[in-house]
Amino acid sequence: MTGSSQAARRGRVVVVGSANVDLVVDVPRHPGGGETILGGDLRRSPGGKGANQAVAAARAGGADTSFVGALGRDESGELLLASLDRAGVRTDLVERVEAPTGTALITVSPDGENAIVVAPGANSHVRIGAAQADRLAAADVVLAQLEIPLDVVLAAAAARRPGAVLALNAAPSRDLPDEMWAALDLLVVNEHEALDLAGGPADPAGTASPDPVERLAAVLLERVPAVVVTLGGAGCLVAQRGAAPVRVPAPRVDAVDTTGAGDTFCGVLAAALAGGSTLVDAARTASFAGALAVTRPGAQDAVPTADEVTTFAHPEQLP
């Protein structure tokens, strides 16, 4: 991931993760403990970190993308399958199980910030069988998150071929065992997740940088070869062993809903890496895609197309 950019190609991405139906309500502000707030109309849309990232890798990133996940035998499952299919994601490895499809309860404030509670449901039943392992062994990038059992992520890591990148979006944050750290090639986290995984604020004396995010990244680099710390509207920090950290700015946009922005970033990052981009270049492309996503409501519904990302990133190329 530290080499020069290669010619663009359609790489292969396998996303192993969750799929949820999102129940979204706009609120004037997020409620406090014991408080009731009147919100707007209820919106129901496809979501889940894994499914969102698969849609982003395929639609916005242009990668040959497969999704490994589990859905209930219910209407919510049909809604999610249809959304994945429309984005061009291969869904033959999605299993239907005797559990309700995962559900996320989301409130969105006027500034676009969200608060989310997830009921995992079928996501607790994701597994790596023979067919899933075969597809993982053919991937250029394997992308996972932590809304599914950790042993499934470890099984996916074991199934990948030598040289393939294992990228983990460590969200929601949780302690990772040593075997997970040892398997990782790339960690993608926001600043809060970085703080959790680093075990608290990094000691300024421990690194040469006075920047607190760079210090956190330096601590994480002791356990993983590369880290991307996403910083919302401030872009992201790309840190790799043996290289100086790079700040990648995010374009300025008017945020409508930030629900799927991080997932769009992760999916496009994986697709760009699978296509041969360097990590810094992949992060730049992913930042443009994530910025476009926050200008639209929803998660998967907000994911832009690859053409929209290219036009946004390179307006000078317009006729």
Image (cartoon, rainbow, N blue to C red):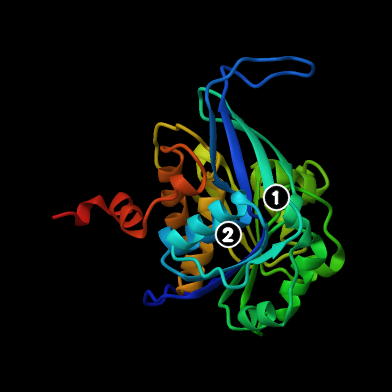
**Whether residue 20 is situated above or below residue 185 in the rendered picture:** above
Where on the picture, by quarter, is residue 243? bottom right
Q: Who's the residue at 58% across and 19% down the image?
A: 39
View extreme (left): residue:
319
| Left or right placement of residue 175 versus residue 302 in this view | right
Q: List x then y, in percent, for residue 7.
A: 37, 77
Q: Who's the residue at 76% across and 59% down the image?
A: 98
| Left or right placement of residue 64 versus residue 191 in this view | left
User: Which residue is under mark 1?
Assistant: 171
User: Which residue is under mark 2?
Assistant: 244
**Element at badge 1?**
loop
Q: List x then y, in percent, for residue 266.
A: 55, 56
Report the disc number at residue 196. none
View extreme (right): residue:
177
Q: Quadrant of the C terminus?
A: bottom left
Please state which of residues 98 and 16 is positioned toward the viewer in this rendering: 98
Amino acid type for the residue under numbered disc 1:
Ala
Amino acid type for the residue under numbered disc 2:
Ala
Q: Nearer the viewer, mark 1 or mark 2?
A: 1
Where on the picture, by quarter, is residue 128? bottom right
Mark closer to the chain start, 1 or 2: 1
Using a 10 Å C-alpha cutoff, classify the residue at mark 1 as few (fewer than 14 neighbours), some (14 to 19) or many (20 or more): some
| Left or right placement of residue 235 versus residue 60 in this view | right
Whether residues under marks 1 and 2 lie with C-beta atoms below 8 angstroms apart, the answer is no
Q: List x then y, in percent, for residue 48.
A: 62, 50
